[in-house]
Structures are given as structure tokens and as C-alpha cells.
Image: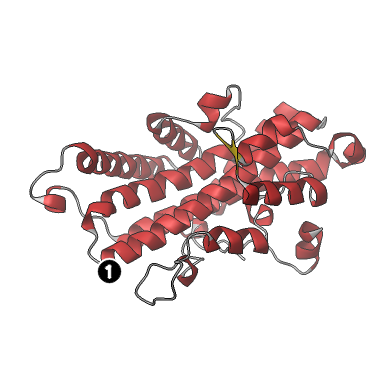
Amino acid sequence: MQFIVRNIIGDDFDYKNIYDYFSEKQLEAFKNWIYSRHHKNINSSMTIKLNSEWITRNYLSSKMILSATVMLTSLEYAIEKNLKMTLPYLYYYSLITCCRALLYANPYNEWKDNSDFLNMSHSKIINLTKDYLNHLDKEYALKIDNILNELKESRELFSYKFPSTGLAIVNEYDLDEIIEICSTICELAQLTSEQIQKYIFKKCMDNYEDWSRVDLNYLKHTYSYNGITDSEDWRRIDYIKRKQPFPASIYYTMTEGMVEDYFGAWCPDDEDDDLYNPDVNWRIIFPVR
């Protein structure tokens, strides 16, 4: 399976940002906080239900990061082409989508009700993000909370009221700063997702054959949209179900084919250098393969 091959060749995740913002002590405490929750929930007794839930969670986190990548490269294009009306939307949704990746990977965010978990309100996403980042660094948590709320207000302003002075009425954010924040949140999502993988390989492999199957009641949320099946999502999750039936981290959930096909869906139909092309900068926030 691709997980084993990538481990053998040393294809490990390369963190770029988090060690610039947080100390090793902070990051170690954060990892232990996540790991301890997995231990409480699983207690060395992995089940088909839990296996299915965490495969689904990490797949959803992967999709959020890929989606945020498309939004950010679209934002770069919109700035270059002076598509100002789209900027408040793209700034805000790029960041909040990265936050969703972090929340899906966090075991303290319990999956009790499908609607509440899969369709979290924006207020809940912002509040939970601040809460979870507080366990890492309170100052950074407050900074992200303030930025999210400001971007949310700007997005709402240019969705419903449209002031005549345009974007001059709101704070101007630096694109590079937002990209860096998104990348840091995605790295924290990856760090968080590694803990379920670490726990399973340390505590649960003795009875792997008993739980290494999946419950489609969970997996269907990766490919079914209001009753419509997305064939590409189905193909990718079916591959995981057959070839990698355990919760791998976000990085190992993203196969090369998954990444290529995801961005390919947003490519222009015509070969025109002036059109937006998502293939230009895949790795803007995450080292996708």
C-alpha cells in the first residue's frame, strides 16, 4: 500500500511554519493533548465504527486543504486581474476552510450528529478554532480569532450591503500574511491528524483484522452530496477502503492521483495562458504530492 511505500522511502511531512511560531515544548504538549483524547476514546480497542469515522475525518480534512488551496490561488488570480468583488469572499473562505480541516482532525470535536458536525456554523468553527488553539498558544489563538471575525464581517458586508467606497472601507489584508496563516493552520491539522495514526500503530495493531473494515454510513459523507454521488470522491475513498483501511494522517491520505484529479477539475477547458489555472501553485499552503 502507498502508506508503507512512502514510509519506507522516507516520505515524511516537512513542517515549515509551526516551529517558527511555537516552541517545541508547546507543540509537544499540544500533541500529547490530542493523543490523550484518542487514548480515552479508543482505550486500545479500535472498532470498525471508529476506524470508519477517522478515515472519513482525515479524508474530509484533506479535501478542505485542497479546497483552500484552490481558493488561495484563485485569490492570487483575482488580485492580479482586479476582480475586487471576489476578494472578501476568497480571503475569508480560504482561512475558515483551513480551520475546518483542523476541526475535522481534532478528537475533542466529537461527531455526534451528522448535521452539526458536517455543517458546522461559521460561529462554531471560529469559536472552536480559538478554543483548540488556546491549548497551544493563547496569543496566537486570539490573533486568529480576530482575523477570522474581521474577514467574516468583510465578507458579509460585500455579500449584503455593498458600500459605495468599495474595499477602501475595510482593513486591507496582506495576501502573503493570509497564505502564511493558512499554511500554519494546515500544518497544525496535519500534526493533529498524525496522532490517530500514531495511536493506532502503537496500541491497536494486535487485532488489526478485527477492525480494519469500514462502515459506509460514515464513508458516504465523503462522496454523497444531497443524494448525488460524486464518482471521483467515490473512487478515491474506495481505494482507501481497499488498500489503506485505517486512518492515515492527512498527508498520507492525499495520494498523488487524488491531488492531480482534484486540481484538474478546476482547470480551464481552453489552453489560454490568461485563464485561471490551479496547476500553477499546488503547494501554496501544503506540500501536496
Q: Which residue is mark 1?
A: 80
Q: Please identify the quarter of the rendering in which residue 256 is found.
A: bottom right
Is residue 40 shown left or right of residue 181? right
| SS at badge 1 | helix
Q: Is residue 167 left or right of residue 208?
A: left
Determine whether 97 is above or below 127 in the image. below
Question: Quick one: 266 or 7, which is closer to the camera?
Answer: 266
Residue at the farthest front position: 270
The crowding category of the residue bearing disc 1, from other C-alpha atoms within 10 Å (few below 14, some 14 to 19, many at least 20), is few
- Residue drawn at x 81%, y 52% is 243
- The amino acid sitting under disc 1 is Glu
Looking at the image, which is closer to me, 138 or 42?
42
Identify the residue at image location x=27%, y=64%: 79
Q: Quadrant of residue 187?
A: bottom right
287 w.r.t. 134: above or below: below
Q: Where residue 223 sits in the image (x, y, percent)?
A: 62, 41
**Residue 21 shows up from this direction:** no
Residue 248 position in % (x across, y down): 71, 49
Check the picture and name the quadrant holding the N terminus. bottom right
